[in-house]
Image (spheres, rainbow, N blue to C red):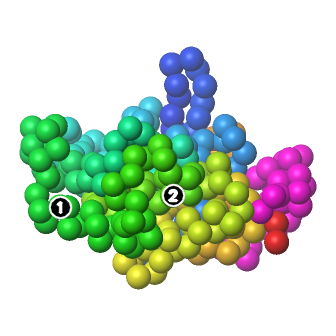
Amino acid sequence: MLQIQNLTKVFPDGTVALKDVSFEVRDGEFLAVIGLSGSGKSTLLRCINRLIDPTSGRVVWNGQDITAANTAELRQIRRQIGMVFQHFNLVKRSSVTTNVLTGRLGYVNPWRSLFGRFSADDRRRAMAAMARVGIEDKADNRADQLSGGQQQRVGIARALMQEPKLMLADEPVASLDPVLSHSILRYLELLNQQDHITVLCSLHFLDLVHRYATRVVGLKGGELVFDGLPSELTPAKFKEVYGEEAEMVSVASPHAA
């Protein structure tokens, strides 16, 4: 179980990104995190794996306080937490295989990884991960030769190399068209259902939330304003999260069926 306890993040310029946020995520859930840009979604996800250190509060995963972990402990924890980024976060000039192999960095000697010395077993894992997301035929291509949807699949394959129990997806389809958005979310859904990986995914569009999430939390101005099932996210509740933007986001969404 993942427990977010009174999490607050105040940046040096005084911006309050998160304010006393608390909720729990059960193992195996597909949790959608919704809210306008600037609501704290990305900050929340990055606090969970300590890419950002919270100002106060705790993140506890399976009884271990991530926020109190030292460097060695955090390295061990991060092995089990995959991350998929909105802008892919790939080494563009490197091959797809090289990018996927970087997902094993938490498991190999840093000096070996510096020179690209991954084991035959790691390379087999990389091919299997690429096959899971349908890009094994792109193994030798440079990352910048791929489409946006293919690059995001590289990001998922890289995260799979960590053998994660938890997957954080920070607006993974925000820069993709509707068809590719569903394609990427289906891969995350399969990992959730087949591998029992808990998924936390920030999303903007109501139709995607209803289609893929098993539970939803909504942030507004850094505060938790909704926690419930997708079926409970009525237009009125949706408007509580998005305010006057609600109609535009939910009705005029380019992802609408």
Per the image, label 2 sits on a secondary structure element best described as: helix
Q: Going by the image, does 118 lie left or right of 93? A: left
Q: What residue is drawn where x is 88% and y is 57%?
A: 252
- Mark number for residue 150? 2
Q: What residue is drawn where x is 57% and y is 39%?
A: 18
Amino acid at dot 1: Asp
The mark that comes first in sequence, 2 or 1, is 1
The residue indicated by pointer 1 is 122
Q: What residue is drawn where x is 34% and y is 59%?
A: 139
Q: Front-most of 71 and 122?
A: 122
Q: Front-most of 211 and 50?
A: 211
Asked whether 235 falls inside the magenta stretch, the response is yes
In the displayed orientation, state which residue is furthest to the bottom: 194
User: Is residue 221 at least partly visible in the picture?
Assistant: yes
User: Is residue 172 at least partly visible in the picture?
Assistant: no
Q: Majority secondary structure of the magenta segment?
A: helix
Q: What residue is drawn where x is 77% and y is 63%?
A: 255
Per the image, label 1 sits on a secondary structure element best described as: helix
Q: Which residues are magenta?
A: 227-255
Where's the N terminus, which quadrant? bottom left
Query: Is residue 191 depicted above or below 150 in this figure?
Result: below
| Measured Cα–Cα span from mark 2 to mark 1 | 21 Å
**Depth-wise, is mark 2 or mark 1 nearer the camera?**
2
How crowded pointer 1 is (Cα within 10 Å; few <14, some 14-19, many 20+) is rated as: some
Residue 166 rendering spot, x and y as whole percentages: 38, 63
